[in-house]
Each structure stands twice: as C-alpha cells, then as structure tokens.
Image (cartoon, rainbow, N blue to C red):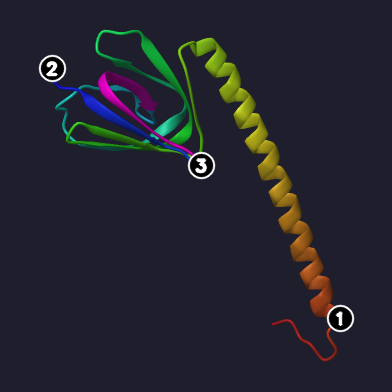
C-alpha cells in the first residue's frame, strides 16, 4: 500500500509524519483531498482545519493559519506561519481561534509602532537645519 509523507513546516517548528493514507483540506476553490499517487498539486490553503489519517486509523486534525501546500511524488509539504495538531477538532478549533486573535493583536501593535516611528522620523526631519523634504 502506497502512502504519503507529510512535512509540516511552521515558523519555529517542523514535523514529518510518515504513512499518511489520505489528507483533506480547503483552499479558495473549496474542499479537496489527496491520496497517494495523485498528480502534483500546488495551492494556497485557507485558514481553518485540515485532516489526515495514517492507514485505517482515526483522523488527526491540523489547525492552519493558511499556508502553501505542495504535493508531488507522494510527498506533501505544508508551509505555514503556525499550525496546531490534535485528535479533537473542537478543541483544535478553539485553539486556532485563540491563535488567530493573538496574531491580530500583534499585527495591530506592529502597525501602531510603525505609525509612531514614521511620525517621529518626520518630526526629526523637520528639525534638521536647512533640511528639505523632497
């Protein structure tokens, strides 16, 4: 029986999961599945849950903050800023929502800091004697 090797690549983590028999996820076109010996695929994943199983075992779930999926030669690579794994989709959904909320807060803080930095740079440029802003 042919299987897939799944490589999960996050910003600070990496896992390899051998023996995957099927994988299900979503992109902008909707839900799709991957089985061994499938044609190559490259797509941008939607934020949300994906799932996979090894052999005839139970489904395992991935919480993804979006990302890039590449499949070729029975090797599936998912590159994302953050991923979460669990066997319980409800718990994973809650954790993913908390992670996305945390990331939104960090982005707001970063945007605010950038705006403050730009304002301070402009104030300093105006104070330079004989300086002109072009």
Q: Main secondary structure of the magenta part?
A: strand
| Closer to us: 21 or 102 | 21
The structure residue drawn at horizontal position 20% and vertical position 23%, both measured from the top left corner, is 3
Q: Secondary structure at mark 2?
A: loop
Mark 3 element type: loop
Residue depicted at 50% across the width and 43% down the height: 11
> Along the horizontal axis of the image, is 10 left or right of 5?
right
Compute the Cα span from label 1 to label 2.
72 Å
Stretch of the chain drawn in magenta: 13-26
Magenta highlight on residue 17: yes
Q: Earlier in the sequence, mark 3 or mark 1?
A: 3
Residue at image location 49% in from the left, 10% down from the top: 88
Front of the two marks 1 and 2: 2
Q: Is residue 71 above or below residue 32?
A: below
Q: Answer left or right for 76 relative to 114.
A: left
**Which residue is label 3 attached to?**
12
Q: Residue at x 69, y 50 (%)?
A: 110
In 3D space, how far apart are the residues under numbered discs 3 and 1 (Cα atoms)? 42 Å
Q: CA distance from mark 2 to mark 3?
A: 33 Å
Judge left or right: residue 107 versus residue 6.
right
Residue 27 at x, y = what percent? 38, 30
SS under mark 1: helix
Residue at mark 2: 1
State left or right for residue 40 relative to residue 42: left
Name the spot of residue 64 as percent of width and height, x first. Answer: 47, 29
Where is residue 116 drawn, in percent x and y?
Answer: 79, 59
* Residue tagged 1: 127
Decide: few, some or many residues near mark 3? Use Cα within 10 Å; few <14, some 14-19, many ≥20. few
């Amino acid at each position: 029986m042919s299987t897939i090797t799944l490589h999960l690549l996050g910003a600070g983590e990496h896992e390899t999961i051998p023996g995957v028999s099927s994988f299900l996820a979503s992109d902008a076109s909707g839900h799709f599945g991957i089985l061994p010996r499938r044609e190559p695929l490259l797509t941008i994943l939607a934020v949300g849950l994906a799932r996979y199983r090894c052999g005839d075992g139970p489904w395992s779930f991935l919480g993804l903050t979006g990302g890039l999926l590449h499949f070729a030669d029975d090797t599936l690579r998912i590159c994302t800023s953050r991923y979460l794994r669990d066997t319980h989709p409800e718990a994973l959904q809650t954790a993913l929502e908390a992670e996305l909320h945390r990331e939104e807060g960090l982005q707001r803080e970063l945007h605010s800091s950038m705006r403050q930095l730009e304002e301070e740079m402009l104030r300093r440029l105006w104070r330079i004697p004989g300086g002109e802003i072009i």
